[in-house]
Amino acid sequence: MTRSPSKPLVLVALLLASFVINLDTTLVNVALPALTRELGASTSQLQWVVDAYNLVFAALLLTSGSLSDRFGRKGMLMAGLLVFGASSFIGGYANSPAELITARAVMGLGAAMTFPATLALLTGVFTSRKERALSIGLWGATAGVAIALGPIVGGFLLEHYNWSSIFYVLGPVSVAVIALVALFVPRSESLDRHRLDYLGLLLSGAFMGLLIYTIIEAPNRGWTATASLAGFAGAALLLAAYIIGERRAEHPMLDVRLFKDMRFSAASAAVTIAFFTLLGFIFLITQFFQFVRTYSPLSTGVHLLPVAAAVAVGSTLGTRLAVRIGTKAIVTLGLALQAAFYFWAGGTISPQLGYGIIALQMVVYGLGMGLTSAPATESIMGAVAADKAGVGSAINDSTRLLGGTLGVAVIGSVYAMLYDARLDSALPTSLPPQLANLAHQSVGAAYGVSGQLAAHGQHSVASAVLQAATGAFDHGLSIGCVVAGFVALAGALLAGAFLPAQPPRRPAPDDSPAELARTSHEAAVR
């Protein structure tokens, strides 16, 4: 580092950079209905407004992390924020879905450049384990707060302005954060002066891009469809080629032998599972609030505040407790709390359930999420060498994105299959086939069918459709919760079995080889 700035100001600048990227996760979703009305976007185009961003983000994370290690993390962070903010602002002027999808893809590039650099710079400034744990805890807390604030901010903007405002606002916000980074974040000198691993950059991007694309499309194509199986097989071949290439490379972008370290691999698995449950939770609960409870997007965001607050508390406490008690115990507890939430919610969720109980359930979930993701991230970054912090951060971010994409796809598929099956047997036989097909598209579409029937005086059929859709949604939601609960429970068991409690103790000058071996073994099994 070239200078010694105020650490609190560095922390604020980097947390705000992370916050802007996390805010976009749910901010844009609020605008989707308006895009249908004002841009004429189809369902497929709406999906790609979201997925174009995620696909480019995922494909270029490892590449951006590696380039930041080579050419400087501060410069990469500022360039990424500029790309992200400019493309978002330009996207607000889109006159067609295709133009907006293109802007979203460029936003994904900016996010990929920005996000790994925030965590890598944090760990470069806060070097002691206690400092690093606190900063990573706060970094994790911003994710929960930003994800919950997205619908609140988006709902407020849509109530006062049009859909473009959601994209305009990220432009000046990004510029403001760039200014803070320029003023307060120290420049990191390149510690990795070896030539770039071009093959690794290419294969890692191709693998992540193909894998995420296949997962996104699998629910529509079918998980066992030829295209899905070919996509997964292609991703597996690219991963195998990447591993072989990295093992043979003289200066690999990532030493794949790092995955033998359970602090890295087991923690990465825990983060993947945590975000599988988080995005699955958001997918389910937002539909419950907006369709069953008929909350507006703004009201939905407000009702999600308990989980945001709990994630923030769990993240900040979790990393500090991990230093004292051990990462194994805290991450295992966090995943167990997530499993408990899902089993509790799966057994109690209904249209009549009081919000007080739902809020308490969300607090349990949020604490579990915070206790899992932040300590696991601290473990990952503690296992990575300083000159590879950018790639290490990108691996952590990739596991988050992979887990979240899988969560929406898998839990969404389970829910959709059960909703469809239950609706088949529950819809009134007098309902015209065209309206029945429309009701099968989603619970929101079914409620729309009910409203149309009521408007035409067919109140008994409308009521029957409403009850059938609500019952089918409740059934799919409950089983989806149970599936997520078992995934979280499996994660807790794996963390308890494989995740080390503490990193190996750094050797003191007078430590004997026998003492070092004993303390390293104790750290691994505690």
Image (tube, helix red, strand yellow):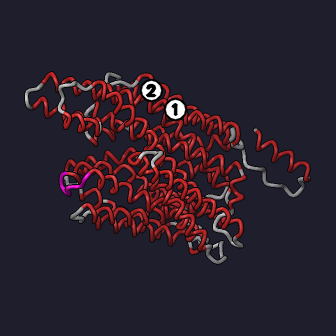
Q: Residues within 10 Å of mark 1 (few under 14, many from 20)?
A: many
The reply to whether the C-beta atoms of the residues labelled 1 and 2 are less than 8 Å apart is yes
Q: Is residue 40 magenta?
A: yes
The amino acid beneath tag 2 is: Gly
Q: Position of residue 361 (x, y in %)?
A: 45, 29
Tell me the quadrant of the picture where the N terminus can be found: bottom right
Q: Earlier in the sequence, mark 1 or mark 2?
A: 2
Q: Is residue 9 magenta?
A: no
In the image, residue 400 above or below residue 53: above
Outermost residue, front direction?
A: 226
Q: Residue 203, located in which quarter of the rendered image?
A: bottom right
Write down the residue under mark 1. Answer: 485
Would residue 364 be found to the left or right of residue 29 on screen?
right
Q: Position of residue 200 (x, y in %)?
A: 60, 68
Give the distance between the C-alpha atoms of the residues marked 1 and 2, in whole angstroms: 9 Å
In the image, residue 315 above or below residue 162: above
Q: Which disc number belongs to residue 346? A: 2
Would residue 32 be found to the left or right of residue 515 on screen?
left
Looking at the image, which residue is at 52% across and 69% down? 74
Q: Is residue 311 visible from the viewing direction of this image?
A: yes
The amino acid beneath tag 1 is: Gly
Q: Position of residue 273 (x, y in %)?
A: 55, 42
Q: Is residue 2 visible from the viewing direction of this image?
A: no
Q: Position of residue 424 (x, y in %)?
A: 30, 29
Q: Which disc number belongs to residue 192? A: none
Q: Residue 254, located in which quarter of the rendered image?
A: bottom right
Nearest to the observer: residue 317 or residue 373? 373
Looking at the image, which residue is at 42% across and 28% down? 478
Which span is picked out in magenta?
37-42
**Label 1 SS:** helix
